[in-house]
Amino acid sequence: MRLSLRQVEAFRIVVQTGSVSRAAERLFISQPAVSRLIADMEESVGLKLFDRARRFQLTAEGRQLFREVEQAFSGLEWIAKRAEDIATFRVGHLRIAASPALALGFLPPIIREFKVAHEGVSLVSLMRNSPDVAQWVANGQIEVGFAALPVNQSGVRLKTLQPLPAICMVPKNHRLSTEPFLTPALLADEPIISLGSESMLRRLIDDAFARAGVSVLSSVESMMSAQAAMLVHEGLGIAIIDPFTAVAFQHPGLVLKALHPLVPYEYAMLMPEHAEPSRLAQAFIETALKRGKAVQRAVEEIYGELPG
């Protein structure tokens, strides 16, 4: 049996319109062409579909086949509707992941803006350390990742973003809150809320202090910048943390200060190496890039013009 979609479409429209002439108008072909399509279909299926003596009334077999045709076209219309929904971001699913500082300090405003623009899209946001985020991207478990550098993972394409400097978070009533910027020498005798020893930013801060001949007086060690910011609010010391968390956790009782020498916080967006991001992922990436620019402007207000 050689049955064409054009034959089935002609059959359906003749039944819907009740007329070969009106079907021809809908299909933008001649009436003889519609009649030929119907005759070819009857020959293909081996059934008489219309009683021509009764002005193209369906036969019993024709009615039965028409029910099947309607079901098939309903399925096609559903597929077309879903395709339109996907194309216009009315539906979809996106999985992202980020290291803790970025998951808590960077992503929330991005997710909010993305969801406002794409209400029908479901989104899963996961938080893991940077190596795990990179591995998930490489394995295809997530579409977009955000991680602190360095990242040494095969199968991952990095979009490295401009490094932003670490920021000192100081209680507003602290004696150093009026200083134009802070240095290791000024912080020499201050209790510092330090990041965990596994943190690359912590190692860079320790190196900066060591070069200045100052030891970090670590009063509390926290694995996450967000907790360090809250501990500053509790009056337990001064924190030197990533710029995203510092900007996100600003509070009237806290002051953000530049640290000199500058200690860079390097980060990147991660995508699978051999797969282009979906249109949905690309929309999220664009939102993230816009947020990154906003944080950069906020940091420039603290530091002045940033190098690079």
Image (cartoon, helix red, strand yellow):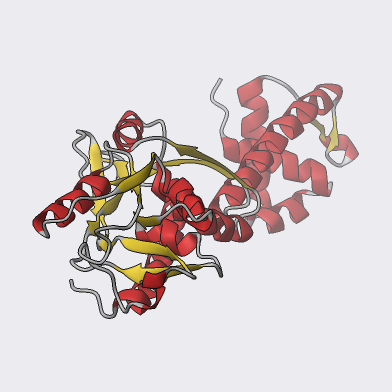
Specify whether 210 is left or right of 303. Answer: left
Q: How many marks?
A: 0
Q: Quadrant of the C terminus?
A: bottom left
Name the side, left or right, on which 26 lies relative to 228. right
Residue at (57%, 53%) from the top-left corner? 89
Question: Among all residues in the image, which is located at the extreme right?
Answer: 54
Residue placed most toward the observer, 186 or 253: 186
Q: Residue at x 27, y 36 (%)?
A: 198
Q: State which quarter of the image contains the N terminus.
A: top right
Give the quarter of the image for residue 13.
top right
Q: Residue at x 54, y 65 (%)?
A: 251
User: Image check: 26 left or right of 142?
Assistant: right
Observer able to see residue 123: yes
113 in relation to 100, above or below: below
Q: Position of residue 137 (x, y in %)?
A: 34, 36
User: Can residue 149 be seen here?
Assistant: no
Residue 256 percent location from the top left of the image: 41, 69
Q: Quadrant of residue 80?
A: top right
Which one is in front, 66 or 21?
66
Q: Position of residue 265 (x, y in %)?
A: 26, 56
Q: Residue 42's x, y, as percent?
A: 68, 27
Which is nearer the eye, 138 or 60? 138
